[in-house]
Image (cartoon, rainbow, N blue to C red):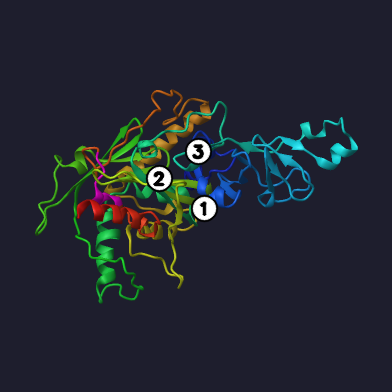
Amino acid sequence: MLTATENERLTQVGPGTPMGALFRRYWHPIATTGELAESPTKVIRLLGENLVLYRDRSGTYGLIDQLCAHRRVDLSYGIPEEQGLRCMYHGWMYDETGQCIEQPFEETVHPDGRFKEKVKITAYPVQELAGVLLAYMGPAPAPLVPRWDLFVWDNVMRDVGTTVLPCNWLQCMENSLDPVHVEWLHAYYTNALLDPHGRADIPQRPNLAPWRVRQHGKISFDLFERGIIKRRTFKPSPGDLGTTEADPEWTSGHPIVFPNMLRVGSSFEYRVPMDDTHTLHLVFSAYAMPPGVTAPVQDTVPRYDVPLFADDGTCIVDYTLGQDMTAWWTQGPVARRDLEKLGQSDVGIILFRKLLQVQMAKAEAGDEVMNVFRDPIENEQLALFSEYQPGGEVSRANLWVRQASQYSPVVPEIDRLYAIATA
């Protein structure tokens, strides 16, 4: 159990907060290049700040204050020009550094004036990797954008699924340090939804299928250079021999990548703090091609919505991630950790909180924090691992392990390619 003050330190992410200072040491995914190709501006809420992401006509991306310095108009309605974003109200224009570079009427009245040089709004650097746009809001010099393996793999198709969740980022992330919930939230609960005497009152969806309930035998957590490894064994049951410490679920384990990313099979799940009570949940997937098949060229990496609610207002709970998201946001906007009662299944959550506190202290002291990369050679490809792919290969079977991809526009084409390859 945490005190209310300790809970605030771990959950508040705005400017001037300890956790906000830590998160500002990292690059965060905020959009895709395809979104900006369709519409050149997008409102971004990130770490408690309101910003506008834009793409000018030269292809340069900028992330600047949402409001113009002149009369405080919303720049998301602005006009992209060759070298910046122009406010539609009076024509003031800003470049990607936030510098005002044009003030049309002021320059007419005072051709030699230097007023525009004195006007600069908040701006943060943006970089693109594998079709994803990432932002950095921390101290200079900015570190390198981490080139995690799924971002740089060859011969894959990629997509990005997003959900805006009405809850704090830590509720999402702590779920990844809680292996025991799998047998209850995903297996037992799914079967209860299918049982006419269980929870048949909850509307059914077409993807609901029975789960095999596997009881956990042991769980363990270890720190490693990128975060925390989660390990588990399953007890034997009728028709199931269970697993031991010789199986991949224990020997390889499951990586939680500090501070806010989970690797699941061929997907990354980012829990990006928008503010204290909203989280952008972003699933980046890289789908491997079957042997002998070349991946089709993707002009852009498509983004799709991963829904939280059905049309009738109920939570969508017929797939794994939908069940997780329901468990996260129903804890409230910010979970009351001062009221919780932790048990033996929560040792991973306790370890993660301690790691956060250690890294927050480093950020406050001005020291380098975990998973900040500055060596281009080290950053060429940052390899990770997963219990779902102990040999390092991504199989067809684990692509849908979280099932968010049922909403993806890419998956039907991948199904078609696999069908041809295996015919």
In the foreground, 358 or 190: 190
Mark 3 nearby-residue class (10 Å; few <14, some 14–19, many ≥20): some
Q: Which mark is residue 25?
A: none
**Would you say residue 140 sits in the magenta stretch?**
no
Q: Are marks 1 and 2 in contact (CB under 8 Å)?
A: no
| Residue sitting nearer the eye, 84 or 140 | 84
Q: Which residue reaches farthest right?
A: 109
Q: Residues within 10 Å of mark 2 (few under 14, many from 20)?
A: few
Q: Which residue is mark 1?
A: 278
Q: Quadrant of the C terminus?
A: bottom left
Q: Are marks 3 and 2 in contact (CB under 8 Å)?
A: no
- Looking at the image, is mark 1 or mark 3 earlier in the sequence? 3
Residue 297 — which label? 2
Q: In this rendering, would 26 be left or right of 78?
A: left
Q: Amino acid at mark 3?
A: Glu
What is the three-letter code of the residue carrying label 1? His
Mark 2 is on which residue type? Answer: Val
The span shown in magenta is: 393-399
- Of badges 3 and 2, nearer the viewer stands 2
Q: Position of residue 16 (x, y in %)?
A: 59, 38
**In the image, which disc is placed on residue 128?**
3
| Front residue (pair 131, 117) | 131
